[in-house]
Image: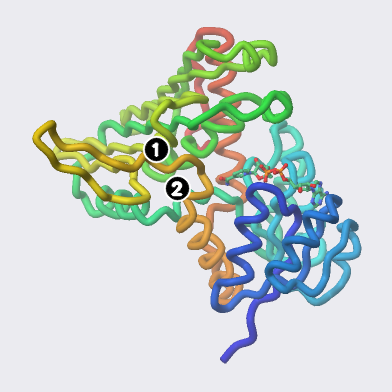
């Protein structure tokens, strides 16, 4: 049996904790080191999962010399620097999205990431959701014929707090970026972005100069039309739906239920459980599969997770959507984006 992949984790916040749990429990990986300036939280996570080394100092973790791979789940402004450190040290890295909020900082690292001999993976977890992956396989196998329309509905249950919004880079770079990645999975060549957005319900989000509601239409090089519907709130939970429509039919992914119990009576049929209420629960399997795929890729030498160029392309689409929403125009993008 090969020895488990020793993983070092940056950040033990909302998403870092998910990665910690997976790295510590997947067969074939072990969570060996944690780095987080919030030492108390890091120590709690380490204690929960039996992680031997905890530090607040990134240099201490990276120079330890006993890691096989790194997961970056620290705040977005730290990503570019940590990816670069990992490349320089020959450490495979899985970094959360987005790579950065400023495309210029992404482009400064682009050549180095291209030339890297070790993998740079970006955390677009939704590609690993079993239902989304299945829908994609169906479309690739010709199940809907020639793809003409892709419709993505993605609504959060509740808006994040004002501090988060202020640092988020706006709805397109923070939230829609996941949908842009899924759009590119189905329609890799996108040529035009049109977005309409509104400050519809949240005075806090409006005060931050951001939108709480957006609809984005992407045009593919083959004439495909992708529609992405986003809201920062949703009364019935985390709304995650997807439909691919083509000349031979359609494939559709509805919201998943944590429990599938239903009640039947004289008054009708009722669902008794609400939808998932957070990305952590709805995409739990996806995060696990994402890390499993990355670890397997590192071991075999072929990482198939979305990479640096996917992260850059999704950010370019987000920038185009922001421009379109602000100026009220359609924005052309390079088909390779
Ligand atoms: N893929 C997804 O579904 C998903 C979901 C949520 C967040 N994210 C991304 O993950 C990143 C983290 O988001 P979050 O919501 O977990 O944030 P968070 O604020 O909950 O947690 C961030 C953690 O990183 C720590 N930290 C700060 N600087 C650090 C450094 N230099 N080294 C190590 N740790 C450091 C903080 O102390 C904190 O514990 C963001 O880039 C975000 O966009 C992705």
Task: Of the two numbered discs 2 and 1 on the same chain, state the one appearing first in sequence.
Answer: 1
Residue at left offset 60%, top offset 88%? 2
Residue closest to the eye, 267 or 154: 267
**Quarter of image, res 219:** top left
Q: Is residue 56 left or right of residue 107?
A: right
The circle drawn on residue 13 is none
Say above or below: 30 vs 175. below
Horizontal and vertical percent for residue 233?
Answer: 49, 25
Does label 2 point to a residue whose CB lies under 8 Å from ligand 1?
no
Residue closest to the eye, 36 or 157: 157
Residue at left offset 70%, top offset 75%? 6
Q: Is residue 260 left or right of residue 53?
A: left
Circles 2 and 1: CB distance less than 8 Å?
yes
Question: In the orientation shown, which residue stands out farthest toward the top?
Answer: 328
Q: Residues within 10 Å of mark 2 (few under 14, many from 20)?
A: many
Residue at left offset 50%, top offset 14%? 197
Horizontal and vertical percent for residue 317?
Answer: 54, 30
Say above or below: 326 vs 90. above
Query: In the rendered image, which residue does mark 1 sit on?
Result: 240
Q: Is residue 112 left or right of residue 234?
A: right
Q: Quadrant of ligand 1?
A: top right
Q: Nearer the viewer, mark 2 or mark 1?
A: 2
> Could you say whether the residue bearing mark 1 is in a helix, strand or loop?
strand
Q: In which quadrant of the rendered image does the N terminus lie?
A: bottom right
Query: In the rendered image, which residue does mark 2 sit on?
Result: 282
> Could you say whether the residue bearing mark 2 is in a helix, strand or loop?
helix
Horizontal and vertical percent for residue 211?
Answer: 57, 16
Say above or below: 196 vs 333. above
């Amino acid at each position: 049996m090969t020895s488990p992949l020793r993983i070092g984790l940056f950040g033990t916040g909302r998403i870092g904790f998910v990665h910690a749990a997976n790295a510590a429990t997947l067969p074939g990986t072990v969570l060996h080191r944690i780095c987080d300036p919030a030492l108390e939280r890091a120590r709690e996570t380490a204690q929960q999962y039996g992680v031997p080394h905890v530090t607040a100092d990134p240099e201490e973790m990276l120079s330890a010399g006993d890691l096989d791979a790194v997961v970056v789940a620290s705040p977005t402004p730290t990503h570019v620097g940590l990816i670069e450190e990992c490349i320089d040290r020959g450490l495979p890295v899985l970094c959360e999205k987005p790579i950065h909020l400023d495309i210029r900082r992404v482009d400064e690292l682009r050549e180095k990431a291209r030339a890297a001999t070790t993998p740079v993976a970006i955390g677009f977890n939704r590609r690993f959701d079993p239902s989304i992956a299945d829908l994609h396989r169906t479309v690739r196998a010709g199940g809907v014929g020639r793809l003409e329309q892709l419709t993505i509905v993605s609504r959060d249950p509740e808006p994040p707090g004002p501090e988060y919004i202020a640092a988020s880079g706006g709805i397109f770079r923070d939230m829609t970026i996941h949908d842009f990645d899924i759009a590119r999975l189905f329609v890799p060549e996108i040529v035009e972005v049109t977005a309409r957005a509104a400050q519809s319900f949240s005075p806090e989000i409006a005060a931050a100069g951001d939108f709480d509601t957006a609809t984005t239409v992407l045009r593919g090089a083959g004439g495909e039309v992708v529609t992405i519907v986003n809201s920062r709130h949703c009364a019935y939970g985390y709304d995650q739906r997807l439909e691919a429509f083509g000349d031979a039919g359609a494939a559709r992914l509805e919201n998943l239920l944590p429990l599938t119990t239903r009640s039947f009576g004289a008054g009708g049929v009722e669902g008794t459980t609400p939808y998932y209420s957070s990305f952590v629960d709805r995409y739990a399997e996806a995060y696990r599969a994402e890390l499993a795929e990355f670890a397997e890729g590192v071991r075999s030498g072929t990482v198939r997770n979305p990479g640096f160029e996917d992260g850059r392309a999704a950010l370019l689409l987000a920038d185009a959507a922001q421009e379109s929403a602000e100026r009220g125009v359609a924005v052309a993008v390079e088909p390779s984006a």
